Amino acid sequence: MPKNTKFFVLFLVLVLNACIFNNDDDKPKSYLFVEKFTQTEGVLISGPEPPSMQIDFPTYRYDSELNTLNGIIDFEIDKNLRFIYGSGTCLSGTAGGGCGTGLTGVYEIPFKQGAFEMLKIEDDGTIRFIYEDEVFSLGANEEHAVVISYLDTTDMDGVNSISEITSTLTISNFGFINEEDVISWEW
């Protein structure tokens, strides 16, 4: 084979390899969705109904069947986004009513919010995190839950109102969501 032909073939292989195999723009973009959520429910045990604490409304919704995330997205969804973090609390029964939730775009790891600290995300979506000074690992579509129950007593004009409060904290790794399935609510 002539020298010029060898050079042309080598050049062509390198160009095609760069275009076909190293073009990140051709890959579908997806983002890991991790949530720390607390559900607190109160059941009246005795006495009068205590005053009900009300909190805001949910600002996002994850649909596990469709693998879609809809909500108020006030962060950039771009190549620098490492994962989407959802957090919130819902109250029901004598604990109160309503939900307060929010989404955060995370661009840098480690990431810390309250007692939750994300340490690492593996290529397969497995996360390593610290919650209340304990290290955990969750694969995609896995969760870690902690349930705490206690009695709450409130003085209602000299009469005790006693409720059993059950609080369930769940940290969920919902896995990867395609970019087109992260949908900002229109107002």
Image (spheres, grey):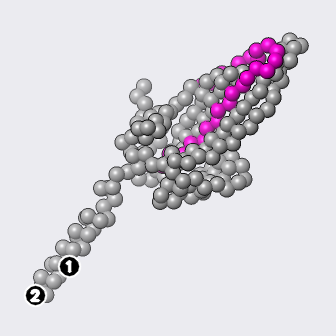
**Residue 2 in the image, given as x and y percentages of width and height:** 10, 87
**Residue 74 in the image, given as x and y percentages of width and height:** 48, 37
Q: Which residue is mark 1?
A: 10
Q: Is residue 103 above or below residue 140?
A: above
| Image quadrant containing the N terminus | bottom left
Query: Closer to the N terminus: mark 2 or mark 1?
Result: 2
Residue at x 17% of width, y 82% of height: 7
Q: Is residue 157 left or right of residue 24?
A: right
In the picture, residue 68 is in which quadrant?
top left
Residue that lies at the very extreme toward the right in this rendered image: 158
State the SS at label 1: helix
Q: Is residue 56 left or right of residue 177?
A: right
Nearer-the-camera pick, 85 or 174: 174
In the picture, residue 41 is in which quadrant?
top right
Residue at x 59% of width, y 46% of height: 143
State the SS at label 2: loop
What residue type is disc 1 on? Leu
Q: Which residues are magenta?
A: 31-56
Q: Is residue 101 visible?
A: yes
Residue at x 49% of width, y 55% of height: 125
**Residue 185 in the image, given as x and y percentages of width and height:** 43, 30
Nearer-the-camera pick, 141 or 152: 141
**Residue 25 in the image, given as x and y percentages of width and height:** 32, 56
Residue that lies at the very extreme toward the left in this rendered image: 2
Q: Which residue is mark 2?
A: 2
